[in-house]
Every structure is written in C-alpha cells, then in structure tokens.
Image (cartoon, rainbow, N blue to C red):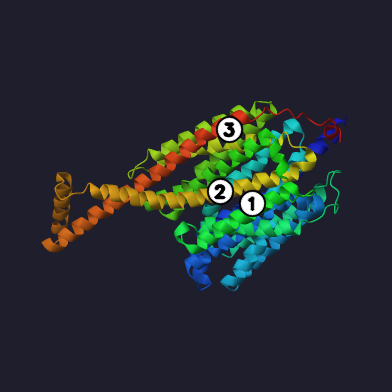
Amino acid sequence: MAGPAEARLMISKRWLVAIAVMSSAVMEVLDTSVVNVSLPHIAGSLSSTVDEATWVLTSYIVANAIILPITGWLSNYFGRKRLLMTVVTGFTLSSVLCGMAPSLPFLIFFRVLQGSTGGGLQPLSQSVLLEEFPGPERGKAMSFWGLGIVAAPVLGPTLGGWITQNYSWRWVFYINVPIGIISLILIYLYVFDPPYIKRGSMRFDTWGMGMLAIGMGALQIMLDKGQEDDWFGSRFITTLAVTASVMLTAFIIRELRTPQPLVKLSLFKYRTFAAGIAIVTVLGFVLYGSLVSLPLFMQELLGWNAETAGIWTSPRGIATAACMPFVGYLLGKRWDARWMLVFGCIIGSMAFFGYASMDLNSGTWDILGHQINQGIGQTFLFVPLTILVMDPIPKEETPYATSLYSVMRNIGSSMGISFVTTLLARRSQFHQARLAGNMATSNLQLLQAQNQANAVFALHGINPADSSRQALGFLYGTLQQQASLLSYMDVFYVMGWLFLLTALLVLLMRKPKRQPSPSLEAH
C-alpha cells in the first residue's frame, strides 16, 4: 500500500487528470449550444440567410455523430492519450479557423472539421476518468465531470448571446483557444495509457465505416431538417430516412459478424448496460427538448426578451451545480444508484408537470421553482446512470461503452429537438382549429368580447368599420396565443410522463458491484 505522501500525490494527480479531460469535454458540449443564438449575426455578417446559416449547426452535428461511435476503436488503435491530444489540438485549431472564416461555405467546412475532432472528446474524457478513479471515487469524479456536461448546454445560449451582443460572433469560437491549450498541457503531463491498450493491433473496417458515415449523416440531417421540410411530405427527407435505415441496418449486421468491429454491439448482452442506454436516450430527448421549448415559451408567449429568458433558464444549471457534490458524496457512501435514479425521474417529472400548469400570466418567480426542480432532478440522473451503466463493463471495453453511451445520448437529443418543434407546430394547428370551431357568431361570449374590443378601438378615434375588423383581428390573435399555449402544455405533459415511464427501466438494472481496485489504490 502507498504511504500518506504518495496517496496525497496520487489524489492530486487524479484531479488534475479530471480537470484536463473535463475542460476539453465542456469545450465541445458548450459549442453545440453556444452558437445557436449567434446564427442571425453570422448570417448577416457573411451575407447569407438564417436558413442557410443553420448548416453551421447541422454540419457540426453530422460530423460529430459520425465520429462518436468509433471513438472506442480509435482510442485502442492509436492510444488513448495520443488520440485525446490529437482531437483537443484539432478542435482548438478548427475553432480558430471558424472564427476567421471569410464566408459561409468556409465556416461550414471548418465546422465539419470541428465536429469530427470534437466528437471523441466526451467518450474519451469519460473513459479516462472511469479508468483513473477506483470504485468508491467514481461517484465524485463523474459528479465533477457531469457538472460541466449538464450545465454547459443550459448556460451556453446565455454565454453565446452575451459574447455576440458585446463583442462579435467570432469570439464564440475564439474562447475555445485558452481552454484547449490548458487542457492539452494537462493531458500531456498527467494522462497515460493503461497497459491493456495495444496500439495498431487491429484492422480497420473500411466498409463498415462507410455504412456508418452515410447512415449517421443521413439520420442527423433528417432529424435536423425534418420539420423545416414537412417531414415525409418532402422527397428529400424521405430519401434520407430510407438511406439511414438501409445503411445503419447493414452496418449493424456487419458489426455483429466481423471479428474486429468498430462498434462493439456485443456490450448489449449486459442487461444493465442495455437498460442504461435506453434511459440515456430518453434523458437526452427530454433535456434537449426542454432546452428548445422553454426559451421559446418564455419569449413567444410570456413576452420576455432573449436575455431575460437566458437568465431565468440558468437556475436549472445552478441547481445542478449545487447538487453535484452531494450526489458524489452519496455515491461514495455506497448509496444505491438505482434509487437515486428513480428519485431523479420523479423530481424531473414534477418539474415538467409544473411547466404544464403555467399560463400567459406566469412570471419569473412562477418558473423559478420548476427550473430548480429540473436542475436537481438532472443531478440525480446523469451521474448515478453513468456509474450503473459502466459498472458491468470490463475495463478494456470501457472506451467502446462510453462511445455507445455518448452516441445514443446525442441521437436522443436530436430526436428530442425534432419532436418538440414538430409537436408544437402540429398541436398548435389542432388547438387553433378546435378553438375556432367554438367561435360561432351565435356565441354570446364571443359577441361580448368583440363588442368590448370595438368600444376600445372606438375610444381611440377609429371609425366603426375599421374598429370591427381590428376587433376580429385582436380576437384571432388571442385565439392563436391560446392555441400555442395549449401546444406547449402538451409538450410539457409528454415529457413529464416520459420521465415517469423511464423510472420503470431502472427495474432492469442491477446494483453496482465493482469494488476499488487494489492495484490502483497501491499504484
């Protein structure tokens, strides 16, 4: 066993490793949300439309999605440290290029480079931490890592809006440079490959990679552009759906048959891992769906500006940050992570049912409690889930497991965003038609409201014919607002019930049994 001085040195070294990999992962996660609010500024600066500028987001997501599944294979082939340094360097340099882009096509190309290098940061950082920290310490390490991963997408839009408003959209990319340099130095000094990684000892599956790239690319573009192009009413979206289905099915069949797969689908034989992958897909769906729906609700219906909406979204991230150390402490005391996960699902569902109870007169303080509830719920979800999912996985297969975990969370996120935007549009039309059907000319309440509106416009000197038209326009605008409100309520109820149903999947998971590794403790 190591002496007290050596033990303190080992603990310090572990936390330096945690800072190195967490900062690089946060840099990548932040970039997925921080650019969103800058799109109008990017479009105006580069002489393009906002619709054209959305390819800045889509290109990054597609490149990211293609690299994510094969990160485990790449880390075993090239070595974890070497790959981590390469992707951090690539992400930092491509961030500089994005900031310097002279036109939209150049920016989209550099975003592809940024997404392809950033894709490996999350699973790589996760596998390094799971390797570095022994059993009871994993809870603290994953709490620290989760602090950045969960809080970054919540705080990203606020940060991006502030930077764009006060400086330039180009600084949204330049802020990655100092973080990348610090992370690179720490990785070089303190991260080392475990002995079981044998660099260059595997064969690359070119056909499998081709199927994966085409399939994941088609899937992500379909999810990103589906609502914009009316889904399967568009030949383009239908073609993407068929391409994704065929290529990903062929990829799965090939991976199950090849002796050296790029993605180890055999990991699904572990029941806890399979259940955890299903849960993290739903959590990504709900988390990113709420990141779209809540700011829109605040701005479109409550009439808040973007800055106010960003500020009153941040309590969620603050609550998450405040609770992370507590969750790590409970896991260190060997609390059953499964019951913590169930608790998180219940608290999360309460938050969404709370959102569904709001109306057009709701204010900042009405939403505060629900934001805090959601933040607390997220804390009790992601960290215990990571501990549970990775517990049965052999160490040499951890990079493959973290890659699958990350890619399914990202697919869930894309599906959540697409689902929310589609459901809001469709349910708003449904409620508008239903409410309009009740507005018959014989409806006494409608006639009374129209007469009151007429009187108000007449007081402002508007002639009777014009005041009647304006009164009807006012009533129709009110109807549209109510229809939109009901559509948001539908979305919030669906997400609340999804949280509760997800808790049932926890019943399939086994209690973690992994103990501290004596070799690691004595290292």
**Residue 249 numbered mark, or none:** 1
- Depth check, mark 3 against mark 2: the one in front is 3
Q: Where is residue 17 in the image (x, y as percent from the top left)?
A: 76, 45
Q: Residue at x 77, y 42 (%)?
A: 397
Name the amino acid, label 1. Thr
**Residue 420 numbered mark, or none:** none
Q: Which quarter of the rendering shows the C terminus?
A: top right
Taking 3 as reference, is 205 above or below it?
Answer: below
Q: Position of residue 126 (x, y in %)?
A: 71, 44
Q: Between residues 321 and 265, which one lies in front from this camera angle? A: 265
**Residue 505 numbered mark, or none:** 3
Q: Position of residue 61 (x, y in %)?
A: 60, 57
Q: Tell me if I can see residue 43 in this picture.
A: yes
Name the amino acid, label 2. Ser
For label 2, the SS is helix
Taking 450 as reference, is 214 above or below it?
Answer: below
Side of 80 relative to 350 (left or right): right
For label 1, the SS is helix
